[in-house]
Image: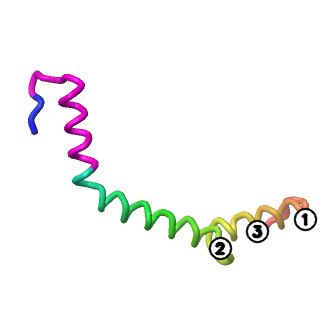
Amino acid sequence: MDMKDVCDKVMVDKMVNHLTEERKEIFMKSTTEMARLAKESVSEGGSSYCNLDHLIKDISTGWSDH
């Protein structure tokens, strides 16, 4: 679709719908992958888990160096 000088609500709506339908599978795969990575990072041994663990240890020991 080419909008050129026409930019009415109907055309924008059609283009957005076309784009979202066309990219739906890509969006779903990306979302699933991001959810997996987030879950992995907060699980034991994950980067967020380890960072939080280090912060808690630092606070409890008075911010000593590692």
Q: Decide: few, some or many residues near mark 3? Use Cα within 10 Å; few <14, some 14-19, many ≥20.
A: some
* Nearer the observer, 10 or 61: 10
State the CA–CA distance, disc 3 to disc 2: 12 Å
**Height in image: 23 above or below 43?**
above
The image's mark for residue 53 is 3
Look at the image and give the residue range highlighted in magenta.
Answer: 4-20
* Nearer the observer, 33 or 60: 33
Q: Amino acid at mark 2?
A: Ser
Q: Amino acid at mark 1?
A: Thr
* Nearer the observer, 54 or 66: 54
Instruction: Please tell me whether mark 3 or mark 1 is closer to you in this view.
Output: 3
> Horizontal and vertical percent for residue 52?
73, 64
Instruction: Please tell me whether mark 2 or mark 1 is closer to you in this view.
Output: 2
Q: Amino acid at mark 3?
A: Asp
Q: Decide: few, some or many residues near mark 2? Use Cα within 10 Å; few <14, some 14-19, many ≥20.
A: few
Within the image, what quadrant is residue 6 found in?
Answer: top left
**Height in image: 3 above or below 37?**
above
Q: Which residue is depicted at the point 9% across and 35% down?
A: 2
* Nearer the observer, 45 or 36: 36
- SS at mark 3 in the image: helix
Q: Which residue is depicted at the point 30% across and 61% down?
A: 26
* Of callouts 3 and 2, the N-terminal one: 2
* Of callouts 2 and 1, the N-terminal one: 2
> Horizontal and vertical percent for residue 61?
90, 65
Q: Mark 2 — residue?
A: 43
**Left or right of 43, for residue 29:** left
Secondary structure predominantly adopted by residues drawn in magenta: helix
Please tell me how many numbered marks the rendered image carries.
Answer: 3
Q: Mark 1 — residue?
A: 61
